[in-house]
């Protein structure tokens, strides 16, 4: 127990320090965490070894569910053909290319085993790419595509892996059976996800206690995953579908208090799990290297080079082919030239090509290879090399690449969209005040003039901001000095109020219980102020 606590606390320290350094140095936290994990793995004392079942049952479901909650179902539907092409077609192509490459060039690796390894290294883990891309100004459409690919490709990869392992271990195998099982697992996972979302929505609509609602939310991914796995369908797809639907329905399903509580809780869960996962990836290096002692250097280099080359080459080739299909096919796979979802440009394709970082799902998947599979340790190393090269190499170069590409439609267009929505919402609020004029309650009538002045002032501010944004090119976000100064003044006022409350508490004029209530009011007021640079 002491060793376990020491490992947990040591990992927590690494997560906090690496994230703090990443913020200060403007480097990807995932890269620093992996490097820290490598260093930690070589220190004397116990280390954690990756347990594929722990990762697949306890880590992947909450991470996927949290990502699905924050994704846009509407935007995903608009880009569904592109997302499906990447999460199904590209994963299958990568698995086959890696499989045939290992079978042809590495002695002792059967085709089925090679495809199993290919399936493990095929699905990108978008955590690192998205964290970098959001800071570097990745356009919303590309964020949606990367998110959607990362949510759906795991189900494809794990299904291919399962079929390939069955073939590798001598079980009965046929192409028709494999396709049928893939379809069954996909359709079953979709059905379980939708059914679970419907049941949970009916229950959570009747829950008003934020603590109960948050507890149900935390338990949802594990329950959905277990139900799906028990009936032998895709638990990963079920969790993703459930999360997408619950996130889409949350505004009408949850109370405001529940949303204010559950979102920070999920952000904290993501912070810890992602941090520990990247540290765990780094810690596997010493064990992985020790297991290679029975192989000669030429075999190790050949196998690693084939796997890595296939992974790095198939993604840009796939992107290029999809972008140059005939227009009828292109509309089906990559966008509608005549609609509001145009084909991806060369710069956008380049950005998507470099967003293929691999992560823990690759290691968890490849560790499920049975011990009797020939050359298992060599194949584990190949997968580990893919993770390290893509995570560190692409992770460190993704932000400079995005800055060099200068993709349009980032800060200004997002600010314009937000202000259009704010103005529309405030117009609805003013219209509701007009309806309240007919109320027979004198107290409501007395409150209307003040509420109207506040609403009309905010509406005027949003409209003025829109005028400025509509006249701005998609380059630098314009700074409104008057607005910035007003926000700074409000923050100074809140700070002064908080200092006065603390002084009254210290003087014995205010109880700690009352201080917490008043402090929570100030915290909520401060939390709605926009971050610097956000409009």
Image (tube, helix red, strand yellow):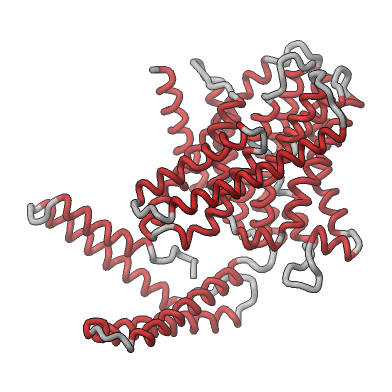
Place of residue 349 in the rendered image (x, y in percent of width and height, measured from the top left): 77, 57
- Residue 72, by quadrant, is bottom right
Query: In which quadrant of the rendered image does the N terminus lie?
Result: top left
Q: Is residue 341 left or right of residue 521?
A: right
Residue 21 at x, y percent in the picture: 49, 42
Position of residue 465 in the picture relative to residue 231 (left or right): left
Residue 97, horizontal then vertical, whole percent: 86, 36
Q: Residue at x 51, y 49 (%)?
A: 199
Q: Is residue 29 above or below residue 299?
A: below
Which residue appears at 82% of the width and 52% of the height? 319
Evaluate whether residue 395 shows in this view: yes
Report the residue at 63% width, 40% height from top.
236
Instruction: State the residue at coordinates (20%, 59%).
Output: 499
Indicate the quadrant where residue 306 lies: top right
Residue 379 against residue 325 in the figure, above or below? above
Q: Position of residue 385 (x, y in %)?
A: 72, 30
Relative height, residue 215 to residue 519 (above, below): above
């Amino acid at each position: 127990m002491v060793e376990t606590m020491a490992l947990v606390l040591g990992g927590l320290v690494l997560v906090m320090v690496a994230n703090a350094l990443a913020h200060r140095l403007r480097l990807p936290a995932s890269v620093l965490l992996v490097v820290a994990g490598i260093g930690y793995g070589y220190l004397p004392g116990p280390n954690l070894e990756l347990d594929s079942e722990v990762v697949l049952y306890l880590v992947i479901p909450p991470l996927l569910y949290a990502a699905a909650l924050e994704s846009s179902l509407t935007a995903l539907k608009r880009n569904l053909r592109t997302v499906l092409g990447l999460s199904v077609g590209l994963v299958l192509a990568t698995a086959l290319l890696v499989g045939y490459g290992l079978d042809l060039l590495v002695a002792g690796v059967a085709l089925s085993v090679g495809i199993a390894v290919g399936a493990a290294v095929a699905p990108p883990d978008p955590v690192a790419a998205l964290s970098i891309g959001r800071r570097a100004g990745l356009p919303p459409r590309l964020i949606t595509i990367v998110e959607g690919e990362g949510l759906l490709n795991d189900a494809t990869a794990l299904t291919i892996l399962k079929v390939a392992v069955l073939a590798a271990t001598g079980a009965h195998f046929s192409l028709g059976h494999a396709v049928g099982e893939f379809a069954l697992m996909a359709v079953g996972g979709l059905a379980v996800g939708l059914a679970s979302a419907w049941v949970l929505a009916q229950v959570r609509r009747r829950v008003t206690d934020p603590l109960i609602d948050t507890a149900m939310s935390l338990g949802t991914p594990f329950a959905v995953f277990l139900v799906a796995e028990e009936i032998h369908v895709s638990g990963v797809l079920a969790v993703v579908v459930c999360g997408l639907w619950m996130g889409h329905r949350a505004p009408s399903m949850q109370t405001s208090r529940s949303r204010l509580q559950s979102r920070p809780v999920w952000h904290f869960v993501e912070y810890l799990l992602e941090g520990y996962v990247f540290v765990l990836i780094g810690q596997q290096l010493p064990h992985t290297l020790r297991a290679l002692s029975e192989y000669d250097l030429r075999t190790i280099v050949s196998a690693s080079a084939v796997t890595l080359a296939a992974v790095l080459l198939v993604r840009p080739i796939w992107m290029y082919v999809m972008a140059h299909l005939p227009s009828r096919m292109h509309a089906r796979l990559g966008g509608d030239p005549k609609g509001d979802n145009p084909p991806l440009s060369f710069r956008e394709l380049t950005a998507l090509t470099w967003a293929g970082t691999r992560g823990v799902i690759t290691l968890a998947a490849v560790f499920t290879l049975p011990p009797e599979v020939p050359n298992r340790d060599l194949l584990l190393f190949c997968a580990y090399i893919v993770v390290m090269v893509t995570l560190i190499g692409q992770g460190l170069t993704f932000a400079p690449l995005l800055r060099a590409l200068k993709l349009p439609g980032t800060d200004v267009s997002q600010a314009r969209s937000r202000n259009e929505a704010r103005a529309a919402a405030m117009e609805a609020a003013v219209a509701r005040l007009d309806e309240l004029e007919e109320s027979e309650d004198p107290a409501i009538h007395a409150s209307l003039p003040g509420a109207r002045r506040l609403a009309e002032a905010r509406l005027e501010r949003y409209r003025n901001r829109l005028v400025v944004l509509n006249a701005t090119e998609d380059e630098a976000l314009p700074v409104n000095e008057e607005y910035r100064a007003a926000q700074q003044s409000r923050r100074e006022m809140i700070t002064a109020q908080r200092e006065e409350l603390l002084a009254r508490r210290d003087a014995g004029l205010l109880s700690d219980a009352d201080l917490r209530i008043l402090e929570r009011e100030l915290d909520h007021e401060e939390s709605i102020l926009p971050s610097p640079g956000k409009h």
